[in-house]
Image: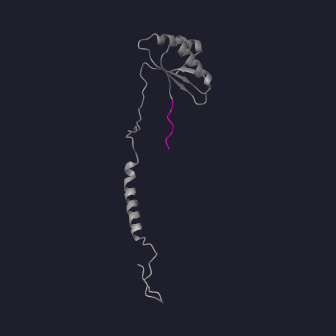
Amino acid sequence: MAMNIPSAGGDEEQVIAAINTTPLVDVMLVLLIIFLITIPVVNYSVPVEVPKERNEVRESKPDTVVLSVDSSGRIYWYDTPVRDVNSLAEKLKKVAALTPQPEVHIRGDWHSDYEPVGKIIFACQSAGIAKVGFITEPPARN
């Protein structure tokens, strides 16, 4: 609070030139509290339902054909080695004639070349297989 001190030479009262900032600080604190309360409410504007994570285990059906490629590039029909791509194409033509047509799943070794996998895909395409998929392992969670 300010005090008026009379001047030494006269009776005149001097005007206080200082501004009282206490009401200004009070108003600013109230505004700050109001903004802090209302900002979390306005944080999102469009209601969006975020998808939940789920883990689906896919099991091979009995009518699914599993072809594997090992690290040296050999092709296997389930666990039986296939001699060459021509014999693979003949087996796939027999499978393609079935109703309903089974899916072909390809398991490629991480260290194998792309060429044997490409040969399997070409054999599936020439045999008329409609559904070809790749079996992979999910990445490790940390």
Of residues 101 and 33, the one drawn nearer to the viewer in this rendering: 33
Q: Quadrant of the N terminus?
A: bottom left
- x then y, percent, for residue 39: 40, 52
- x then y, percent, for residue 90: 53, 10
Magenta-colored stretch includes residue 140: yes
Of residues 28 and 135, the one drawn nearer to the viewer in this rendering: 28
Q: Residue at x 56, y 12 (%)?
A: 87
Q: Please determine whether, in this image, residue 65 is positioned above or below residue 23.
A: above
Q: Please determine whether, in this image, residue 120 is positioned above or below residue 47.
A: above
State how many labels appear: 0
Magenta-colored stretch includes residue 125: no
Of residues 34 and 40, the one drawn nearer to the viewer in this rendering: 34
Q: Please determine whether, in this image, residue 42 is positioned above or below residue 97.
A: below
Q: Residue at x 46, y 88 (%)?
A: 10
- x then y, percent, for residue 13: 43, 83
Q: Residue at x 39, y 48 (%)?
A: 42
Task: Assign the magenta stretch its main secondary structure.
Answer: loop
Colour scheme in use: one colour
- x then y, percent, for residue 73: 61, 23
Q: Is residue 95 left or right of residue 117?
A: left
Q: Is residue 117 left or right of residue 52?
A: right
Q: Residue at x 44, y 11 (%)?
A: 98
Q: Which residues are magenta?
A: 136-142
Q: Residue furthest bottom?
A: 9
Of residues 56 and 110, the one drawn nearer to the viewer in this rendering: 56
